Amino acid sequence: MNEILQILSENARATPAEIAALLGRTEEDVAREIKELEDSGVIRKYITIIDWEKASEGYVYAVIELKVALQRSTGYDSVAERIARFSEVQSVRLISGDHDLSVTVRGKSMRDVAFFVAEKIAPLEGVQSTCTHFILKSYKEHGVILTDRTKPRRLVITA
């Protein structure tokens, strides 16, 4: 794997100077390669992983599994690309198993998510059925553990 990509995948805020120091390369060389990776679309976006629950923001997430009619010329791509355009949609993935697509949706309430699925996703041409699973708690996102570790408590033993 590209060493620069590995460093940026673990720390998107790493500067070209920091990466250059880690890799024993020049800052200019690293900055040029990062620019090439951005221009070619290998690096799509730099993100911040936020524990919304800890930030007291009331977002509700759901995973919606979809059965989709396979289109002769585009397969699942046309339906998946159309769903991906909705701002409420966080991810769209082609999956194996009983369903074809897995869609992660974010809303302000369970009602918002339910209406979004009923009014925007389910009526789309090619969507045969939906199955919504609300996410009750996230333990890990994008490889980052979101739970705070607490030190195990031990009882004081006295004689």
Image: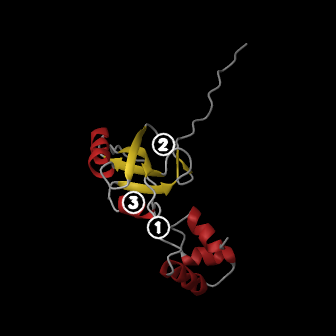
Seen in the picture, residue 153 relative to 113 is either above or below; the reply is above
Q: Which residue is mark 2?
A: 138
Q: Which residue is mark 3?
A: 79
Q: Is residue 25 something one can see in this rendering?
A: yes
Q: Which quadrant would residue 90 be assigned to in this image? A: bottom left
Give the residue type that dot 2 points to.
Ser
Judging from the image, the colouring scheme is secondary structure
Residue for point 61% across, 35% down: 151
Q: Which of the marked residues, 3 or 2, is nearer the chain's N terminus?
A: 3
Q: Are marks 3 and 1 in contact (CB under 8 Å)?
A: no
Q: Which quadrant would residue 132 be assigned to in this image? A: top left
Q: Which of the marked residues, 3 or 1, is nearer the chain's N terminus?
A: 1
Please tell me which residue lies in front, 83 or 49. 83
Q: CA distance from mark 3 to mark 2?
A: 27 Å
| Secondary element at image label 1 | loop
Please state the horizontal and vertical placement of residue 125, each as a whole percent of the image: 33, 56
Q: CA distance from mark 3 to mark 1?
A: 26 Å
Give the residue type that dot 1 points to.
Tyr
Q: Which of the marked residues, 1 or 2, is nearer the chain's N terminus?
A: 1
Q: CA distance from mark 1 to mark 2?
A: 21 Å
Q: Which residue is mark 1?
A: 46
Please state the horizontal and vertical placement of residue 129, each as a whole percent of the image: 39, 44
